[in-house]
Amino acid sequence: MASSNISIPLGDKLVLRGLKFHGFHGVKPEERKLGQKFLIDVDAWMDLQPAGVSDHLSDTISYTAIYGIVKEVLEGPPQNLLESVAQLVASRILAKYHQVSAVRVQVGKPHVAVHGPVDYLGVEITRYRPTNIL
């Protein structure tokens, strides 16, 4: 097995799984006109210890806040590519929440025109907060 230079975030994370939205993303005219279902998973890496100790919502990020960002992108202006949808979700989460050090976004389309059974096809991206090097 070949080694990879990809670093995987470690530590605590917020996890959102199986989010479902109807959106109008895609390059085909029928995708833009009729729309389709999209499945989204999000991981947001951040230190959850302060919230674990205090038991206060103010020491973490509400799941519903991240859900709202995903909903805004998926139900918002159409994008041609799933890569662009995933990038928008990731960049908005990183821009809004400085506590998040990395975010993973998976976007799946369960209804695709392929000749064979599939659960879904899609993309997965991981984006990291830039670090300042002194």
Image (tube, grey):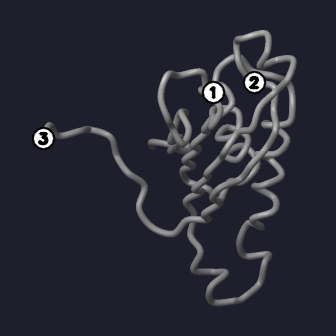
Check disc 1 and give the amino acid type: Leu
Q: Which mark is residue 25?
A: 2
**First-in-chain label (2 vs 1):** 2
Check disc 2 and give the amino acid type: His
Q: Nearer the viewer, residue 88 or 130?
A: 88
- Between the residue at mark 2 and the residue at mark 1, the CA separation in whole angstroms equals 7 Å
Quadrant in the picture for the C terminus: top left
- Between the residue at mark 3 and the residue at mark 1, the CA separation in whole angstroms equals 29 Å
Q: Which residue is mark 3?
A: 1
How many other residues sit within 10 Å of disc 3, few (<14), some (14-19) or many (≥20)?
few
Q: Report x, y in % for residue 106.
A: 57, 43
Quadrant in the picture for the N terminus: top left
Q: Report x, y in % for residue 105.
A: 59, 44
**Image quadrant where residue 23 sits:** top right
Residue at the (41%, 62%) spot, across then down? 10
Mark toward the viewer: 3 or 2: 2
Up the image or down, 5 lies above or below 101; here it is: above
How many other residues sit within 10 Å of disc 1, few (<14), some (14-19) or many (≥20)?
many
Lateral position of residue 58 relative to residue 86, left or right: right
Residue at the (73%, 66%) spot, across then down? 61
Up the image or down, 9 lies above or below 123; here it is: below
Residue at the (14%, 37%) spot, across then down? 2
Q: Which residue is mark 1?
A: 82
Q: Report x, y in % for residue 99.
A: 65, 59
Q: Secondary structure under badge 2? A: loop
Query: Do labels 2 and 1 touch, CB within 8 Å?
Result: yes
Q: Report x, y in % for residue 113.
A: 60, 21
Check disc 3 and give the amino acid type: Met
- Between the residue at mark 3 and the residue at mark 2, the CA separation in whole angstroms equals 36 Å
